[in-house]
Amino acid sequence: MKLIKITLFILLLSMNSFAQDVSYKGAAKMYVSTFWRQAEVFKNGKGTESTIANMEKAIAGVKEKDPSYSTSAMEEEFNKRKTELEKKLANEDAQFNEKKNSTEAKNEKTRQITQMFNDVTRCVQIPLPYQEKEITDFKTRVKSILERKDILAAFKERYKDDPYLETLVNELKNGSDIPLNREINDVVLSINSPYGNASTEETDFKATYFKIQGIQAYWEAAQQMFPEIPECGDAVKKCNELTNKYGTVEKIKAVSKANLVTEIKSRKLPAPVVKDAKLEQILIAGFDKKYGPAYRAKAVKAVLTQDGWTTERNAITGIVIGRNRTGKIAYKTTEGDGKCYLLSNNIFIYEEFIGGSFNNTQVIYNGLGGDEMLCENIK
């Protein structure tokens, strides 16, 4: 008897746990049975949104078929399983979104690193910017790179063992030495040489100024992008020295003009290698006749810069075809500034070899115009 009571108690407990009225035989029996079968699916951990929908339909069916039947236990079970399912789906959505966001973040970072690759390459592997607009555009690109410090660091980390980055670093290291020294030397020579900046045009001085600014901008960018490369810092120091000395158009102009004045004062006819009044007169007369009108000038003095003649021969037969001799001429303009000038290059006396003798004497000058000198230096 005791065993029977225990068995009945367990059965009752089991029935209550599912709250299913197995003795119910009324009009809504099919719906009641359907509901609790669906609830059993949740118990097995396989419940879905469709299962919840079936349970809801079953409750509605019970109320329609047998309004007197109490659905409180069914509704309690329904709400419980619905809440469980909502939590499960929300958790799955969160996991999916987290994975999706993580993938998207990784893809975006990869895209940004690739963009950084292109941007850094475009700034490092270019000719130095020497025009004002080129310098402005270059600084804008560098600013954009430096504003993305995290991506720049990620780029370096991604490519730290890649030959590409090694090549880029070596280019900067090597470029900071001889190539930079050559660039600076060319600028300094241009400023200090009266031939390099002899023009008084403002644009010429500005061109030199922007060249200095371009060199400075490039190496400052390199040092900012790659502070771990000491050679870039050394290059910036060299650029600072150049800028401190010639960093404005006014400074460049002042140095160039001072050097030009000094050069004009010190320029003289070279000492003659040999004196020959007849040949000297040929040079003067030939210049005045052939080149005087173009230069609007007259020769003042000529000197011979070659002792003897250079024989010219036919390249194929070796037969003598003529001879030449070099000289220099100082001339004075007859119109305009009335200044004196020294021909930049040698002027030639040329004679053809015809009929066993040299004749048909000509004066030939293929060089540029003259360089200014003081008339008092023509002696």
Image (tube, grey):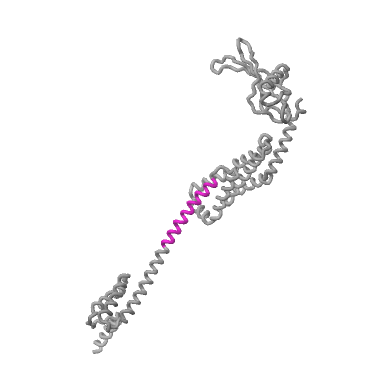
In the displayed structure, 307 sits above or below 132; it is: above
Q: Position of residue 314 (x, y in %)?
A: 56, 17
Q: Which secondary structure is most common in the magenta stretch?
A: helix
Residue extending farthest top: 355
User: From which residue to which does the magenta span run?
Assistant: 99-124
In the displayed structure, 151 sits above or below 125; it is: below
In this view, the residue in front, 314 or 67, is: 67
58 on left or right of 234: left
Tell me the quarter of the picture where residue 12 sits: bottom left
- On the question of residue 26 being in view, the answer is yes
Q: Position of residue 52 (x, y in %)?
A: 31, 73
In this view, the residue in front, 80 or 365, is: 365
Q: Position of residue 203 (x, y in %)?
A: 64, 40
- The C terminus - image quarter: top right
- On the question of residue 231 being in view, the answer is no
In this view, the residue in front, 1 or 354, is: 354
- The N terminus - image quarter: bottom left
Q: Residue 100 in magenta? A: yes
Tell me the quarter of the picture where residue 332 sits: top right
Residue at the image point whose x is 69% and y is 30% from the top? 371
